[in-house]
Image: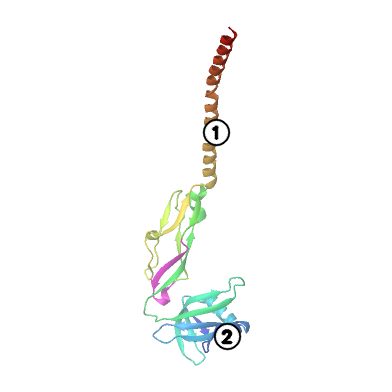
């Protein structure tokens, strides 16, 4: 029976094989995988690609894994490899866990209230710098994601990890000074300022050339004087 808030995943044990065996499994609609941790030896398994996709789509942090021999254990996703072109599942690694022991994991950070931020309304650009956070929590307390409201950010503001307030059951393990987001001035305004400076430089150069005219006049006068002297 699945634990509260978890998803069941039925898999079949298999003998470890090489890349040829893995390709054969994938051609038949299955995904090769390995279960680690829990003080036991790694166990290779295979699972139908559709079953795995449905389990991952509906799962929280913890899944109740059942082997074809009847053994069950709570697991979390350790690694999931997709084909870079097709996106098809290539390999999955699962980690056995104890529900009463904290583990480290990663979660997505979602920024909310972006459109309401005064700096954004003034044309500023909000950039999400860090999208994934490292955390520590009990397996059952690991959230799907963490969110933070940025609706008060002004132009020039920088948001760091220290500003986040995760649930009391979750500990952030990254450096508190890690930059999460920035709100910079409008890019068009910066480009316009650069254009004005460039035009100012051109005007200055023209003015310099104009001031050189008297020297040309003086030189012309000397030439005329020399010509008169020759004539005498």
Task: Kindly indicate whether the residue at mark 1 contacts the one at mark 2 (C-beta within 8 angstroms).
Answer: no
The picture quadrant where one finds residue 146 is bottom left
The magenta stretch is 130-142
Query: Within the magenta stretch, is there residue 23?
Result: no
SS of the residue under disc 1: helix
Q: Earlier in the sequence, mark 2 or mark 1?
A: 2
From the top left corner, tell me how far across and down residue 44 is, in percent. 50, 86
Assess disc 1: are there few (<14), some (14-19) or many (≥20) residues with their C-alpha within 10 Å of its C-alpha: few
Pick the front one: 78 or 117: 78
19 or 184: nearer the eye? 19
Residue shown at 42%/53% (left/top)?
Answer: 158
Q: How far is the residue under mark 2 from the one under mark 1? A: 70 Å
- Residue displayed at 55% across by 80% down: 52
95 w.r.t. 108: above or below: below
Residue receiving disc 2:
21
The answer to whether 102 appears left or right of 90 in the picture is left
Around disc 2, counting alpha carbons within 10 Å, would you say few (fewer than 14), some (14 to 19), or many (20 or more)? few
Residue 231: image x %, image y %? 60, 8
Image position, residue 53 (x, y; %) = 57, 78
* Residue 184 pos. (x, y %): 48, 50
**Quadrant where the image shows the C terminus:** top right
In the displayed structure, 176 sits above or below 40; it is above
Whether residue 4 is visible, yes or no, is no
What residue appears at the point 41 percent right and 77 percent down from the top-left corner? 139
């Amino acid at each position: 029976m699945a634990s509260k808030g978890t998803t069941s995943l039925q898999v079949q044990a298999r003998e470890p094989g090489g890349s040829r065996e893995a390709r054969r499994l994938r051609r038949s609609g299955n995904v090769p995988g390995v279960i680690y941790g829990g003080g036991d030896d790694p166990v290779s398994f295979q699972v139908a690609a559709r079953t795995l996709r449905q389990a991952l789509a509906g799962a929280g942090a913890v899944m109740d894994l059942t082997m074809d021999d009847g053994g069950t254990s709570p697991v979390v996703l350790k690694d999931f490899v997709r084909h870079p072109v097709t996106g098809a599942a290539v390999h999955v690694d699962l980690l056995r866990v104890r529900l009463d022991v904290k583990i480290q994991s990663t979660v997505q950070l979602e920024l909310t209230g972006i459109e309401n931020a005064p700096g954004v309304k003034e044309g500023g650009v909000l950039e999400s710098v860090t999208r994934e956070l490292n955390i520590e929590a009990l397996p059952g307390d690991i959230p799907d994601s963490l969110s933070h409201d940025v609706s008060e950010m002004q132009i020039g503001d920088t948001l760091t990890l220290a500003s986040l307030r995760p649930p009391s059951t979750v500990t952030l393990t990254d450096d508190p000074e890690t930059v999460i987001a920035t709100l910079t001035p409008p890019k068009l305004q910066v480009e316009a300022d650069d254009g004005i400076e460039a035009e100012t430089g051109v005007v200055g150069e023209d003015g310099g050339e104009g001031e050189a005219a008297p020297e040309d006049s003086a030189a012309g006068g000397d030439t005329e004087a020399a010509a008169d002297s020759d004539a005498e």
